[in-house]
Image (spheres, rainbow, N blue to C red):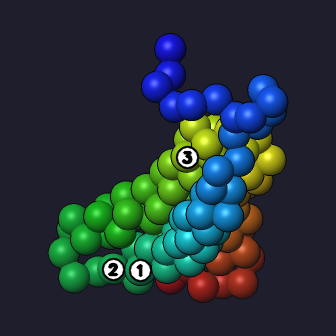
Amino acid sequence: MSERPSAPEGGRNTRHPTGIRVVIAILALLALALGPVGYLMGLDAQAHAGSAAEWFTLAFGAAVGLPFLAAAVATVAGDRRAALWSLALLAWPVVFVVIVHLLGMAG
């Protein structure tokens, strides 16, 4: 049982919907920006054997992990629409990898 007080008249708990949406927007922007940057840095890394793997790991963590984190935050806050939009961001890694390779930016 939750210790959080229930919403008045038994409705949704909307005490801080703007704050939740701001946090989710920040996480989404980070996922949209850091995923491609990390992927491009991984493609360009040639300094030593581990650097490309490190950049690809960071890119994957940003592009996939941050949308899952945003969806979890939205779900706990009770914002289903924001959670679904956060999960829709999981298509972004496929999009940017295809764009990078079609435009010839890969090596």
Mark toward the start of the polypeptide (3 vs 2): 2
Q: Secondary structure at mark 3?
A: helix
Q: Is residue 37 above or below residue 93?
A: below
Identify the amino acid type marked 3: Val
Task: Tell me the residue at 44%/73% (across/down).
Answer: 38
Q: Is residue 49 left or right of residue 91?
A: left
Q: Is residue 107 above or below residue 9?
A: below
Instruction: Name the mark nearer the viewer: 1 or 3.
Output: 3
Q: CA distance from mark 1 to mark 2?
A: 6 Å
Residue indicated by mark 3:
73
Q: Is residue 106 above or below residue 67?
A: below
Proximity of marks 1 and 3: CB atoms separated by less than 8 Å: no
Badge 2 density bin: few <14, some 14–19, many ≥20, Cα 10 Å: some
Q: Earlier in the sequence, mark 1 or mark 3?
A: 1
Give the labeled residue for mark 1.
Answer: 41
- Residue named by callout 2: 45
* Residue furthest to the front: 8
Question: Given contact means CB atoms under 8 Å apart, are the residues at marks 1 and 2 in contact?
Answer: yes
Left or right of 3 on screen, residue 55: left
Badge 1 crowding class, 10 Å Cα cut-off, few under 14, some 14 to 19, many 20 or more, is some
